[in-house]
Image (cartoon, rainbow, N blue to C red):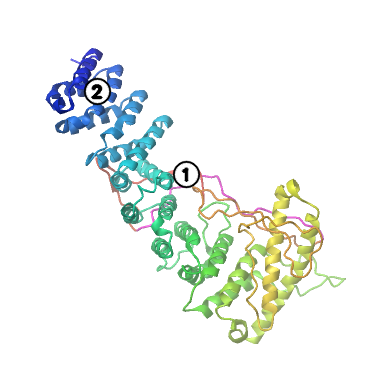
Amino acid sequence: MAVTIEELYRNYGILADAKPEDLSQHKDAYQVILDGVKGGPKEKRLAAQFIPKFFSSFPELADAAINAQLDLCEDEDVSIRRQAIKELPRFAAGENIVRVADILTQLLQTEDSAEFNQVNTALVSIFKMDAKATLGGLFSQILQGEDIVRERAIKFLSIKLKTMPEDAMTKEVEDYIFTETKKVLEDVTGEEFVLLMRILMVLKGLQTMSGRQQLVELVVEQAFLEQALNPADPDTVDRLLQCTRQALPLFSKNVHSTRFVTYFCDHVLPNLSSLTSPVAELDIQLEVLKLLAEMSPFCGDMEKVETNLTMLFEKLLEFMPLPPETEGENGENTLSDEPKLQFSYVECLLFSFHQLGKKLPDFLIDKINAERLKDFKIRLQYFARGLQVYIRQLRVALQGKTGDALKTEENKIKVVALKITNNINVLIKDLFHNPPSYKSTVTLSWKPVQKAEAVALKRPSGEDMGAGSTMKKQLSPPLPRRDARQIYNPPSGKYSATIGNFSNGEGGGEGGRERYSRYNKLTLAPRHKLLQHKYWRLRQEGSCW
């Protein structure tokens, strides 16, 4: 016979009136309260409140009490579930904390937003009681739980960990997080990898120089830099891009990017034109060149500086055309003969070459034969002539524009274009010095600036760099969307008198795509669950990096 409301209140009264030292004598009264989970909705709601209140007084009934509360957490009535979840932290004591954390982590799979928030609140509550034990429950599900539970547990840590009180985040706790995260990283998706790196980056112990070096080592392992790149495999290309993006914020004058830069020169640049883009509408060549450019200032000593510079030099020649041989009636090239100047690509390659050139300043003098050097300077000179014309046209187009006028899409692109062309102009001037110089400093056009640079209202003199970029690049991409980067495509024809054909050649496509393959060789192996096992399946995701 089911327990009634009256019986629940009567037995609650017996326990509430008993002296603390005598509570254990009323085991039968507590058993009646446990049986309340088999009653109707009202009985269940009362049981959800009464069971945890006297839980600590009956250790011999601990398993039965937790199981009874867990039954309420899985009830069909959402109000009962919320009440039961709200009370779960009261069971979190001693050895039970890991179990409660494990249960709460599994409950993250709920689709009810209020219930989901209740689970989050409960997890934060027990984390403050015992951080390491709570993490034990979370990582248990991350490593062995179902897909949805694993995904949400990782997201929980990536969001909540940085908000935890300092006294909870002891060195022991941080070391535990690092150790367990390394286990998870043995088999992750692209999205999970980004979130796990975000978790590690908030740990105080990893914000030192040695800590950042450890993180770089982790990323190197994920990037498989010891293996040759398969440019036709989008998953392989995507893994490299993701790993490089995560490593970028870690590089500094003391934490070097040498292995990544070397890998790009050895394996990526030779296959640049055949790279398979993992995301629709992504300009994969420009993306790769931008990553290389951003890494190059932090490159340390290289074993193959000359070889890497030679590869950059060869790739630079591909994007820097020779001037046309035929001319029209007035000595000007016809529109059909005029090569297309790809400023965005040249900025990246020239910047990377300029950075690595500092390590071997005599490269253009001693390592390149006279004919090739002459050819290179002709290309530089031709490119520089085109730059001067476009820079003048862009300044005229932006002259007098301030405030909201500069915020239109067209003018934003022109501002970026002016930054790109100015950067290339400065770098070319350095290379025309005799001997070539590598002293000038420029800020890459897509990098954020400290202060908004004003657009020049009058023609600047000589070295004036003019307007700066208002574009901002997000180093820790949100999941997993990235701001589209602007590509400047100059008008074709002999130094066209009109500025047009500005296009945004790269975007974050909205089309769905399959779940990324796991980065280890066990991608297709089944993952064994606590109670059952399922095979990993592909799923469609609507956002992209």
The percent position of residue 24, horizontal first and vertical second, equals 14, 27
Q: Which of marks 2 and 1 is in front?
A: 2
- Where is the N terminus found, in terms of image quarters? top left
Q: Number of numbered discs present? A: 2
Q: Which of 86 and 386 is in front in this view?
A: 86
Density class for disc 2 (Cα within 10 Å; few <14, some 14-19, many ≥20) is many
Residue nearest the viewer, comparing 170 with 250 = 170
Quick one: 140 or 287, which is closer to the camera? 140
Q: Circle 1 — which element?
A: strand
Q: Is the magenta stretch mostly helix, strand or loop?
A: loop
Does residue 357 sit above or below 31 in this rendering? below
Question: What kind of element bears circle 2?
Answer: helix
Q: Are marks 2 and 1 in contact (CB under 8 Å)?
A: no
Residue 467 locus on image (x, y percent) = 72, 59
Which residues are the magenta region?
497-520
Magenta-colored stretch includes residue 508: yes
Q: Which residue is drawn at 22% across and 21% down?
A: 16
Q: Which residue is drawn at 43% across and 65% down?
A: 209
The reply to whether residue 75 is in sight is: yes
Of callouts 2 and 1, which one flags the residue occurring earlier in the amino acid sequence? Answer: 2
Q: In which quarter of the image is residue 102?
A: top left
Determine which residue is flagged by label 2: 37
Q: Can you see residue 337?
A: no
Residue 418 image position (x, y, % from top left): 72, 60
Q: In this view, does 152 lie to the left or right of 279?
A: left
Rendering coords of residue 64 (x, y %): 19, 30
- Residue position for label 1: 541
**Residue 412 appears left or right of 140:** right
Residue kind at label 2, given as amino acid type: Val
At label 1, the amino acid type is Glu
Q: In which quarter of the image is residue 40?
A: top left
